[in-house]
Image: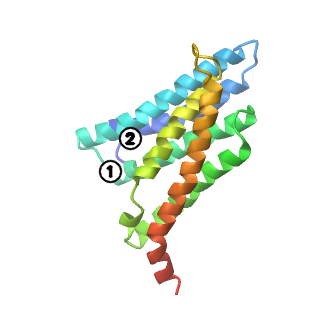
Amino acid sequence: MPLNIPNLLTWARILLIPLFVGVFYLPASWLPPAQQNLIATVVFVAAAVTDWFDGWLARKLGQTSAFGAFLDPVADKLMVAAALIVLVHLGRVHAIVAFVIIGREITISALREWMAKIGASRSVAVSFIGKLKTTAQMIAIPLLLFHAPLGLLDVYLAGTWLIYIAAILTLWSMVYYLKMAWPEISMRSK
């Protein structure tokens, strides 16, 4: 395991997850709900920024590695899953939406792993639909975590619409990836 700045940032993202979740389990006398929401939002946004930054640094410094390529998406999926579970617990996201998003992530990760194993990973490379899904999700989650008005913006309503859009894009992208992988799947299942 190469220990470089991009991999350290990825590990930092993983280590932020217990802090992110733990904020909501502190007594209200220690940290009122509005502050819990703010801290969780800041932690989630910081994790999202380090996700972009560690990839950029890895390419810029020539510190890409197979381990980093493996760990980075794992860290992303863990943080998103933790956020969705917290949001379901807080009653801000419907469990079906969280199940769709988390279930798709597990399914596509397994599909990518299998496709890489058989040497066909190009057929499930990241698509534009997948990037749109990620963008909608990464905007929706902080809005739902923050859960307070921002000027005239109804943050909860905007976050709710975006998380439903993300769920639809999640299903669409899953169908797209499965369709792209189907020739390999059907050929090898005979």
Read off the residue under disc 1. Answer: 65
The kind of residue on which mark 2 rests is: Asn
Locate residue 11 relative to residue 58 in the image: left or right: right
Q: Earlier in the sequence, mark 1 or mark 2?
A: 2
| Mark 2 nearby-residue class (10 Å; few <14, some 14–19, many ≥20) | many
Q: Residue at x 72, y 44 (%)?
A: 95
| Mark 1 nearby-residue class (10 Å; few <14, some 14–19, many ≥20) | some
Q: Position of residue 20 (x, y in %)?
A: 60, 29
Residue 53, by quadrant, is top left
Q: Residue at x 43, y 39 (%)?
A: 10
**Is any part of residue 71 visible from this angle?**
no
Read off the residue under disc 2. Answer: 7
Locate residue 123 relative to residue 106 in the image: left or right: left
Locate residue 102 relative to residue 69 in the image: left or right: right
**Is any part of residue 38 visible from this angle?**
yes
Q: Secondary structure at mark 1?
A: loop
The kind of residue on which mark 1 rests is: Ser
How many callouts does the rendering have? 2
Closest to the observer: 55 or 167?
Answer: 167
Check the image and name the residue furthest to the bottom.
190
* Mark 1 vs 2: CB contact within 8 A: yes
Labelled disc at residue 2: none
Q: Position of residue 96 (x, y in %)?
A: 71, 48
Q: Secondary structure at mark 2?
A: helix
Q: Position of residue 56 (x, y in %)?
A: 31, 38
Q: Residue at x 60, y 19 (%)?
A: 38
23 up-or-down from 73: above or below: above
Q: Residue at x 48, y 73 (%)?
A: 182
Locate residue 44 relative to residue 7 in the image: left or right: right
Which color mode does the image show?
A: rainbow
